[in-house]
Amino acid sequence: MRTFEGYQKGINLGGWISQCRVYETQHYDSFIKEEDIKEIASWGVDHIRLPLDYNVIEEEDGTPIEENYKYIDNCIEWCRKYNLNLILDLHKTAGYVFDDVEGSEGFFDNDKLKDRFIALWDKLASRYAKYSDRMAFELLNEIVDPGVALKWNALAKRAMETVRKYSKDAYILVGGINYNSVLSVPQLDPPMDDKIVYNFHCYDPQLFTHQSAYWQDFMPKGFHTEYPMTVAEYEKAAKDNNMPDHTTEIFRRAGVADMGIGFFDAIFAPAIEYAEKMNAPLYCGEYGVIDQAPTDGTVNWYKDIHAAFEKHGIGRAAWTYKEMDFGLTQEHVASVKEELIKLL
């Protein structure tokens, strides 16, 4: 499988100009500074994934907020200073927000919203294509509805063609349905050129990585698990806590009895096979463990997924640098931080 050169080990900057505590200048100015990029560079990674919400740079009516582009500009400058590549990830667009499923219904059938999405990419590409030697573009974060695969492929093609008006050699990342599941990669269209990268996210098994996650309705407050446990033990834990079937579906898809690198090999296999067939690089834009998990299990999980990434040459960016319940600079993981950094 082709390697996504320059984007093998990375970290997300979640919570800065995306999924913000507050969408205000004071937050943008203080959450990430140059010293943060310097620290990240010292970790030995080669890139940063920068999530961006449309409403940071656009009013609700579409009017550009020109002054807020400086945060992207600053990040580009800092990354170049500290020899890091950058992925600009459009995390939320007008009418489509991955964590507001009901509010996003109809996006793929709304020509006005789709045209606005394309117009935003026209603006982003026209402004940043000149940095394509060190910068890649990710079209849209986490398409949720499994029923829109064909419509998303069609819209993604339009977005790719828009970027190509300004750069013939910029890498463009596209992920699939079901929250960018690795299992959805084979439903993506063949790449339009050799600079298209297939992208997925991996938080499996969520019974471990998202234990006690307050934003997931099916997850009981105070629910805790270890890693590794056997598949039977995870399934029993889900059953004992009345969790829905989808929480254990990944184990059935993997077809393994024990957790470890073999689990990740199994769930990555269809994506790897498809990427090899299409001669496209494969990249994991998000992976990580919630701060409610035990630290020894967190290290074990990172060891296994790291081994799988290395085995198959899959580039990746951990979620996330700071706060956001998954931050690698949080006090929760302070005792194992150095070990986790080595496993990025």
Image (cartoon, helix red, strand yellow):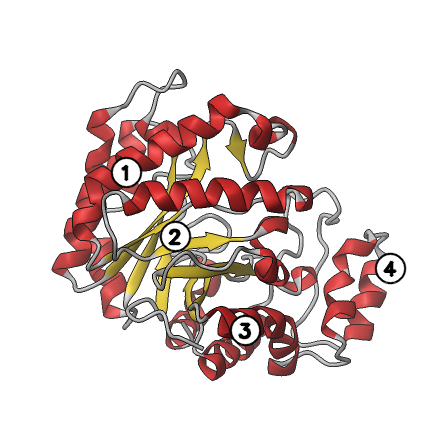
| Residue 96, x across and y down, in percent | 52, 32
From the image, tell me which residue sits under label 1: 124
The first of marks 1 and 2 along the sequence is 1
From the image, tell me which residue sits under label 3: 272
* Residue type for callout 2: Lys
Helix, strand or loop at mark 1: helix
The first of marks 4 and 1 along the sequence is 1
Q: Residue at x 72, y 76 (%)?
A: 229
Q: Is residue 48 above or below residue 315?
A: above
> Residue 147 or 284: which is nearer the viewer?
147
Can the viewer see residue 74? yes
Q: Is the residue marked by circle 1 packed among few (<14), some (14-19), or many (20+) residues within 10 Å?
A: some
Q: Nearer the viewer, mark 1 or mark 2?
A: 1
* Residue type for callout 3: Ile
Helix, strand or loop at mark 3: helix
Residue that extends furthest to the left in the rendered view of this protein = 81
Q: Is residue 151 above or below residue 23?
A: below
Quadrant assignment for the C terminus: bottom left
Q: Is residue 275 left or right of residue 183?
A: left
From the image, tell me which residue sits under label 2: 322
Q: CA distance from mark 2 to mark 3?
A: 30 Å
Q: Are marks 1 and 3 in contact (CB under 8 Å)?
A: no
